[in-house]
Image (tube, grey):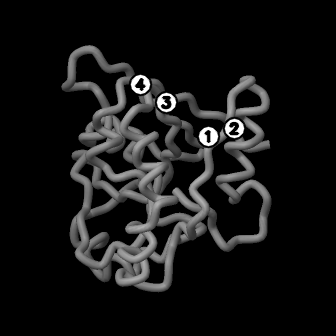
Amino acid sequence: MGNASIPARNYQSNENVRLMAQQLGAAPHFLYLPALPESLEEKHLLCSTEVYRQIQSQWERMDTALVNIGNYPSSPDFASLVRYGSLLQQQHTCGRLLVYYFNEAGTVIQSDQDFAIQIPLELLKQCPHIVGVCSANTSEKALRGALRSGSSPTSQPGRSWSSPCWANK
């Protein structure tokens, strides 16, 4: 997912990636696009750029994904009302994986107005190893929904899924 326009350092995905890569002795790769563009039209324009195509090519080859699991509703909100209208309430949404929202059954809620820039769900589903990271206050419903979503390997042989939860300090 691209960078958020929230000034707090821990909300800056690029900074978090840089720090993790530094600790692991890896090279970070950045998507220099906003996480939440102004509109669906702007998303389509940004996703047609060479910068996006290069990152998409790397997503297609990755073997491990580190994803955030959170509650719904949550703060920050990631423009959920604008992107989904009343769908999230109608579908009994309980959590999110990155900024894909799902209900306890693991159904990922789809919206024609979702303008978030993040790894496409179909590419994430192809990743052999997914590590879910959440805080200690993430609900059981959100964790269950994440594990039941099509983004976890529970129904796909040969894939692994890990979901550590760390307390906020």
What amino acid is at disc 2? Ala
Relative depth, front residue between 100 and 147:
100
Q: Which residue corresponds to the image point at 34% horizontal and 53% vertical from the top-left?
A: 120
| Disc number for residue 129 | 4
Q: Which residue corresponds to the image point at 40% horizontal and 67% vertical from the top-left?
A: 47
Give the mark nearest the N terminus, 4 or 2.
Answer: 4
What amino acid is at disc 4? His
Dot 2 falls on a residue whose secondary structure is loop
Instruction: Choose mark 1 or mark 4, whichever is in front.
Output: 4
What amino acid is at disc 1? Ala
Give the mark nearest the N terminus, 2 or 3.
Answer: 3
Relative depth, front residue between 46 and 35:
46
What percent of the width, then of the height, locates residue 98? 47, 52
What is the C-alpha distance between the residues marked 1 and 3? 16 Å
| Disc number for residue 131 | 3
- As drawn, the residue found furthest toward the top would be 158
Query: What residue would you read off at disc 2?
Result: 167
Relative depth, front residue between 156 and 38:
38
The crowd level at tag 3 (other Cα within 10 Å; few <14, some 14-19, many 20+) is: some
Query: What residue would you read off at disc 1?
Result: 136
Q: Is disc 1 in contact with disc 2, using a CB cutoff of under 8 Å?
A: yes
Left/right placement of residue 32 relative to residue 85 reads: right
What is the C-alpha distance between the residues marked 2 and 3? 17 Å
What percent of the width, then of the height, locates residue 142? 40, 47
Q: Which residue corresponds to the image point at 70% horizontal and 71% vertical from the top-left?
A: 6
Q: Is disc 4 in contact with disc 3, using a CB cutoff of under 8 Å?
A: yes
The crowd level at tag 4 (other Cα within 10 Å; few <14, some 14-19, many 20+) is: many
Dot 1 falls on a residue whose secondary structure is loop
Q: Is disc 1 in contact with disc 4, using a CB cutoff of under 8 Å?
A: no
Dot 4 falls on a residue whose secondary structure is strand
